[in-house]
Image: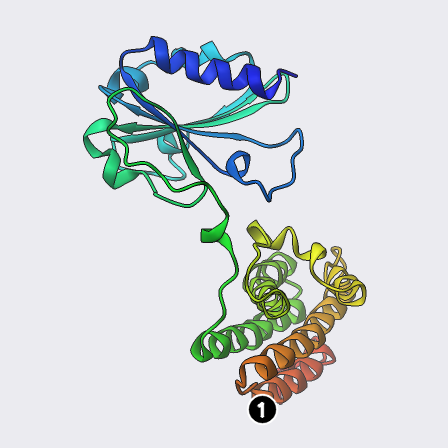
């Protein structure tokens, strides 16, 4: 596997030798001193370029970076259509395990298209066109305290969509039930857990995308309970996971509510929990819910 230094030399040498590339910016975990260092870290790179069409009209130029296992061109995908011709991304996984997420941005619109987020660092600026970034930090990714409305909306979404899971399970529509459980319901549970972490860290940390660092901040029993919310493909196991999620959400939400002096919607919780228990044992040939 090529070293970090070799990869950085490769990325910068290409930019230095190609007159069309006027600036290079690096984003992501490699600029974050608080991110764990491992062999899966991507190189998140932006090239600010002239004549972007000269790059995108023939993609073979990226062969310079090495032999690939696979490449994705999200801006050239029919699944994720875009009409923006001034931005183009190459996501490349190489045979030595390295990965570069390389985005081209047209020099004519770079100030509009480049996100000035806190994990950015200018590596090269031939024309001094890029306004310097502050020293990189994860400040844009740290947890933020919820407003009372955000807290209430999170609770409402969790309990509302839980009824969708129950409906899917009763109908034996496992893909629908799992999608609702692992999408909206879990997202709200993770959001509440993030706020819980915020209350004990004074909102000074980031728990990463999808809460991937939550384990570092939750106490052991709470983390173990969270892990128990991940079901297999068995209907009964999914039912159990749904109720565990409800219990965990309630416990954590009450803590968050207490911290901010917010009101937890116990009436919604009680009514929906009762509904879920009822649907769980509703006969499969029932013609009415009640």
Quarter of the image where the C terminus is located: bottom right
Nearer to the camera, 29 or 151: 29
For this orientation, the residue located farthest to the left is 108
Residue, disc 1: 267
Nearer to the camera, 213 or 31: 31
Relative to 17, is 210 on the left or the right?
right
Asked if residue 113 is positioned above or below residue 144 in the image, the reply reads above
User: What residue is shown at x 57% (from left), y 40% (from top)?
Assistant: 33
**Callout 1: few (<14), some (14-19), or many (20+) C-alpha neighbours within 10 Å?**
few
* Relative image position of residue 140 (x, y in whole percent): 45, 52
User: What residue is shown at x 62% (from left), y 15% (from top)?
Assistant: 2
* Relative image position of residue 192 (x, y in whole percent): 59, 69
* Relative image position of residue 38 (x, y in whole percent): 67, 32
* Relative image position of residue 219 (x, y in whole percent): 76, 64
Question: Which element type, helix, strand or loop, lies under badge 1?
Answer: helix
Asked if residue 288 shows in the view, the reply is no
Relative to 101, is 52 on the left or the right?
left
For this orientation, the residue located farthest to the front is 135
Relative to 194, is 84 on the left or the right?
left
- Give the total of numbered labels: 1
User: What residue is shown at x 54% (from left), y 77% (from top)?
Assistant: 155
Quarter of the image where the N terminus is located: top right
Q: Quadrant of residue 125?
A: top left
């Amino acid at each position: 596997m090529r070293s970090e230094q070799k990869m950085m030399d490769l990325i910068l040498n290409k930019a230095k030798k190609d007159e069309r590339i006027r600036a290079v910016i690096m984003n992501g975990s490699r600029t974050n001193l608080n991110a764990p260092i491992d062999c899966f870290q991507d190189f998140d790179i932006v090239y600010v370029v002239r004549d972007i069409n000269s790059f995108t009209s023939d993609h073979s130029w990226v062969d310079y970076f090495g032999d690939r296992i696979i490449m994705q061109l999200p801006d050239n995908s029919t699944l994720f259509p875009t009409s923006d011709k001034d931005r183009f991304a190459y996501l490349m996984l190489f045979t030595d395990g390295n990965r570069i997420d390389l985005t081209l941005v047209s020099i004519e619109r770079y100030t509009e298209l480049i996100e000035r987020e806190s994990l950015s660092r200018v590596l090269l600026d031939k024309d001094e066109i890029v306004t310097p970034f502050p020293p990189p930090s994860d400040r844009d990714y740290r947890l933020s305290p919820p407003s009372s409305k955000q807290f209430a909306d999170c609770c409402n979404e969790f309990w509302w969509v839980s009824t969708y899971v129950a409906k899917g399970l009763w109908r034996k529509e496992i893909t629908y039930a799992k999608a609702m459980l692992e999408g909206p319901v879990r997202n709200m549970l993770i959001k509440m857990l993030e706020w819980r972490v915020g209350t004990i860290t004074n909102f000074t940390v980031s728990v990463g995308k999808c809460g991937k660092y939550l384990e570092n901040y939750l106490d052991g029993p709470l983390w173990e309970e969270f892990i128990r919310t991940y079901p297999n493909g068995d209907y009964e196991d999914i039912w159990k996971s749904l109720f565990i999620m409800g219990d965990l959400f309630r416990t954590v939400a009450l803590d968050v509510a207490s911290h901010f002096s917010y009101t937890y919607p116990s009436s919604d919780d009680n009514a929906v929990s009762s509904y879920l228990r009822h649907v769980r044992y509703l006969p499969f040939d029932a013609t009415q819910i009640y």
